[in-house]
Amino acid sequence: MHENPAAKTESDAALAEKYRVLRDLMLTRHTRNSRYYRIGKLAVAVGFTVLSVLLALLGAATGRPMPPLIIWIALLFLIVFVFVILERRMHVMETRIIPFLTDDAQTTLDLYDPWEDDGEEEEPEEEEDP
């Protein structure tokens, strides 16, 4: 069966409107979440600095610096782990997804796939004959 050309144009217009709504929603949420992320980074930095001072004072007051030091190191690793993941997410959003959403002429989303082959194949080592 053949489709009605008028129905196809209405369908295309509806899809275009859905795209515009989703694009605007994603851009708005990204802007808001970026602001929250920057505020959160600042709050965590200030909180970690205050906690570092408190843990140092606790270690000095009790004469047992190892328990506060262990807490400090564990918390440091946790914070670094969380912010490495969040920074990567923000980097991908700002360098790949946001430019894709704002440029209507771009039709392909160029995301890096870590599981994809880079094109560099290892050459097998040849065994030397004695």
Image (tube, rainbow, N blue to C red):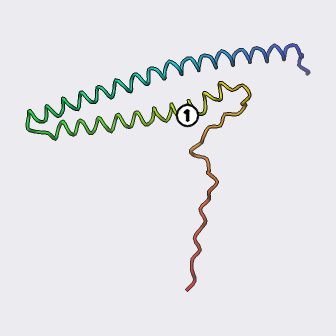
Q: Position of residue 109 (x, y in %)?
A: 66, 34
Where residue 76 sits, quadrant-wise, is top left
- Residue at x-position 63% and y-position 29%: 99
Where residue 26 sits, quadrant-wise, is top right
In the rendered image, which residue does mark 1 sit on?
92
Q: Position of residue 15 (x, y in %)?
A: 74, 18
- Residue at x-position 28% and y-position 26%: 47
- Residue positioned most to the right: 2
Q: Position of residue 77 (x, y in %)?
A: 33, 39
- Residue type at mark 1 is Val
Q: Please tell me whether mark 1 sits on a helix, a strand or a loop.
A: helix
Using residue 41 as the reference point, say whether residue 98 is left or right of it: right
Where residue 10 sits, quadrant-wise, is top right
- Count all numbered tags in the image, as a single digit: 1
Q: Is residue 120 above or below residue 124?
A: above
Using residue 30 as the reference point, say whether residue 67 is left or right of it: left
- Residue positioned most to the bottom: 130
Q: Position of residue 37 (x, y in %)?
A: 44, 24
Quick one: quadrant of the N terminus? Answer: top right
Using residue 78 as the reference point, say whether residue 91 is left or right of it: right
- Residue at x-position 8% and y-position 34%: 62
